[in-house]
Amino acid sequence: MKNLVTTLFIYFLVILFLCNKHSKYVVGFRPQRRGGRSTRFYDFKVQTTRITKLCNTKDIPTINGMYPGPVVYAQEDDKVIVRVTNESPYNITIHWHGIRQRLSCWSDGPSYITQCPIQTGQNFTYEFTLVQQKGTFFWHAHVSWLRATVYGAIVVYPKKGVPYPFKFPYEEHIIILGEFWMKDMVQIEQAVLASGGSPPPADAFTINGQPGPNYNCSADDIFKIDAVPGKTYLLRLINAALNQEHFVAIANHRLTIVEVDAEYTKPLTTDRVMLGPGQTLNVLVTADKPIARYSMAMGPYQSAKNVSFQNITAIAYFQYFGATANGLSLPAALPHFDDNLAAKTVMDGLRSLNPVTVPKDIDRNLFVTIGLNVQKCRSKNPQKDCQAKGGGVMAASMNNISFSKPNISILEAYYKNINGYFTQDFPGVPLKFYDFVNGAPNNPPNDTNSLNGTRTYVLDYGTKVQLILQDTSTVSTENHPIHLHGYSFYVVGYGTGNYDPDTANFNLVDPPYMNTIGVPVGGWAAIRFVADNPGAWFMHCHLEIHLSWGLSVVLIVKNGEGPLERLPHPPKDLPRC
């Protein structure tokens, strides 16, 4: 018996050794403690996966064959290492949306901004530390339109022993909003850009990859939460959609917002929320209604005029235990698709949980207009290539500059002093001021045709920045979800009409701290941050078609003087173009 015990013990030690040796890149591998901080290892394989939805079977790019992709779990201050191997026919990069990448700009992920894409058969290891960050984030492809299916959640828990600033929920659920097209996304992107016109609407909206019963052949493709009466649930809402902003509501239930873009807020209770692509919200919902099946609805918020969009609502179920499994569900009431007030009132009520330290003495005051443009047709085949309004070509711009991506990484070109791939002359104010909201269409004396260029704006380390984002009506006013990589920012002001410094009301006490701000329809948003993270940081509209048309810019933040203020050398496995 003693020999048997000894043999089993030795066998156990051998198994443990082999597991440790080979589990470095196992998804969900239990973290190893080093110096009080965990290291989380994940292995992402980019693959094409065959799925069937809406009576249509197609191959889609995925991570590890999952749609949506695997969840990355971590704790505040953990180090995360993700090895991405490209087994698909597409170039790929992964962006860790909302992660501030403190001194790890090389791992930020936007293609041709911080890295060249990972080509077929190649791999790249992303490494970053979640410095003082916790909450709901997400990751997604940042090349072409592959993020239509290549996306997943990041959940970062507080440090051990640190509670939530609200009653601990009975359960947590990740709710990822998405869009589904039956055609190949790369082909759709290529066709849209070649036509000069607008993209087709999605064939369906999805909640955790499921369209729900309102669509063809989708009666069983429904996500469901089984709710215990009387219990409170934390829903981690993520809008991973490509080209549409969305309202979300649960029938007969109130949602209490407690976190926005992975930062705690004062509790704000509402009947519905709106998320632009790139935004995350944590909400509490209590199962305090009669036992029944309640619809969780996702529908479009379409603020631009004369744009075709999908108007069929995606449905999931918030179903109480004891409810009839096949019974009717109580419908959720969503705002009208163009209800700008419904979108604005929630934003108006957001406040940081506690008073915060907002930059007061501003070093650099930037004013950036955002919007769409129609360029002159220069094609010999205008009926095919110039399908925008008036026979033109669609574009988008910031301060009337449509961003053009180079064919190498801007960060690498900047770091290695390689000339010829970008300039440092993005204008900090519009070249001409006029009535942006009411007088922007391209009529004399206003010339609103945009210029093309790979222009960047350079900031010294430590610069206190105020940035005014102003919507324009060159084509149509519209709500634009603007995302800044590498930073979160305080949204100190927010309003309709043209920005006027003499009348704008600013909150410098407890403004929300965000990484993606929906600049309101025909309005403006004022944000502030300190440029204390060196690198090349992409700022862009998170509506993918607007990004493709050029609604973006790169902010270059110089190195500081101290050892923790300088960007490290690029990793050895950084992909080559």
Image (cartoon, helix red, strand yellow):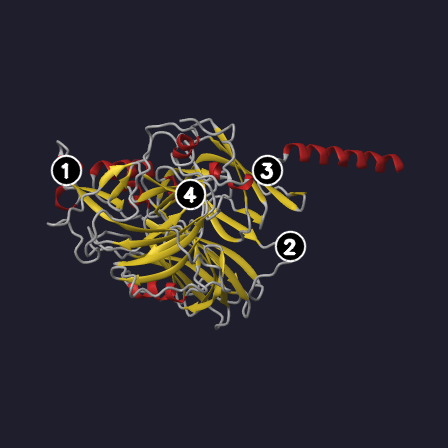
**Could you say whether the residue bearing mark 3 is in a helix, strand or loop?**
loop
Q: Which mark is residue 483?
A: none
Residue displayed at 29% across by 53% down: 310
Q: Nearer the viewer, mark 3 or mark 2?
A: 2
**Mark 1 — residue?**
377
Image location (x, y in percent) of residue 210? 41, 51
**Could you say whether the residue bearing mark 2 is in a helix, strand or loop?**
loop
**Mark 4 — residue?**
460
Labels 4 & 1 near each other (Cβ < 8 A) = no
Badge 4 local density, few (<14 within 10 Å), some, or many (20+)?
some
Q: Which mark is residue 26?
A: 3
Badge 3 local density, few (<14 within 10 Å), some, or many (20+)?
some
Q: Which amino acid type is shown beneath numbered disc 3?
A: Val
Residue displayed at 77% across by 34% down: 11
Q: Nearer the viewer, residue 59 or 188?
A: 188
Q: Which amino acid type is shown beneath numbered disc 1?
A: Cys
Q: Nearer the viewer, mark 4 or mark 1?
A: 4
Q: Quadrant of the N terminus?
A: top right
**Mark 2 — residue?**
160
Q: Say whether disc 4 or disc 3 marks the residue closer to the N-terminus.
A: 3
Q: Quadrant of the C terminus?
A: top left
Mark 4 and mark 1: Cα distance apart in space: 40 Å
Mark 4 and mark 2: Cα distance apart in space: 37 Å
